[in-house]
Amino acid sequence: KIIGAQANVWTEYIPDASHLWYMAYPRALALAELCWTPRRQMRWGEFTRRLGPALARLETRGVTFRIPEIRYEVRTPGTELAFSRAAIVRATLPPHASHVTVALQTVVPGATIHYTVDGSEPTSSSPTYKRALRFAMNANPLSIVAVAVLNDNRSSPPSFLTLTRR
């Protein structure tokens, strides 16, 4: 009987220490959550609430880490959807959805969110997210791509959201 957990990082394709830390974090934080939090107390929302400050501490120490993808919250009259664990989301809205409100969130404090609505990958010159975005829905799909950018200009992988109306 073995009690415990282990997470491996295979280094044959990791060229330097910076990339090693990128591969280890935030996975190591998730492993600590798994090992130290009793199962009945585990809650995804609580973990992500603590994850942001932990990543901010890593950043101040110069530890590179993988920046988690943007979380999307989509609202239409009578419908609320939240997507947080997939980099590519395709959703179909009800036929009565004449407009949609999309909120973007990152767990990393102080990160700036840049987005596009034409399906292209955001850059530092793309619009900066400040408040929930509202779009009219028509027969054409709505495509939003977003990234979180840290003070040192490192960014998260792009998150893709495509919404269509039935």
Image (cartoon, helix red, strand yellow):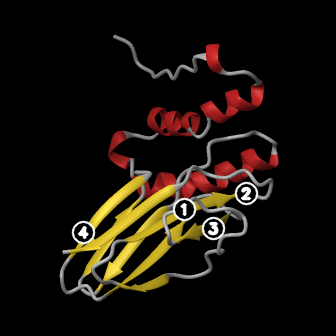
The three-letter code of the residue at mark 4 reads Thr
Indicate which disc residue 92 carries: 4
Residue in front for this viewpoint, 166 or 29: 166
Q: Residue 78 lies in what quarter of the image? A: bottom left
- Label whose residue precedes the other's in the sequence (2 or 3): 3
Secondary structure of the residue carrying tag 2 is: loop
Report crowding for label 4: few under 14, some 14 to 19, many 20 or more residues within 10 A (C-alpha): few
The three-letter code of the residue at mark 1 reads Ser
Which quadrant would the N terminus be assigned to in this image?
top left
Report crowding for label 3: few under 14, some 14 to 19, many 20 or more residues within 10 A (C-alpha): many
Report the residue that reaches farthest toward the top: 1
Q: Is residue 38 above or below residue 110?
A: above
| Gap in angstroms between the C-alphas marked 2 and 1 | 20 Å
How many discs mark residues in the rendered view?
4
Q: Give the left or right position of residue 31, taking residue 89 as reference.
A: right
Indicate which disc residue 114 carries: 3
Q: Residue at x 39, y 52 (%)?
A: 43
Camera-side mark, 4 or 2:
4
The three-letter code of the residue at mark 3 reads His
Q: Give the left or right position of residue 147, taking residue 36 as reference.
A: right
Residue in front for this viewpoint, 45 or 140: 140
Q: Residue 15 lies in what quarter of the image? A: top right
- Label whose residue precedes the other's in the sequence (2 or 1): 1
Do the residues bearing badges 4 and 1 touch, measured as CB atoms within 8 Å? Answer: no
Which quadrant would the C terminus be assigned to in this image?
bottom left
The residue indicated by pointer 2 is 150
Secondary structure of the residue carrying tag 1 is: loop
In percent of width and height, residue 60 lies at 81, 49
Do the residues bearing badges 3 and 1 touch, measured as CB atoms within 8 Å? Answer: no
Do the residues bearing badges 4 and 3 touch, measured as CB atoms within 8 Å? Answer: no
The three-letter code of the residue at mark 2 reads Leu
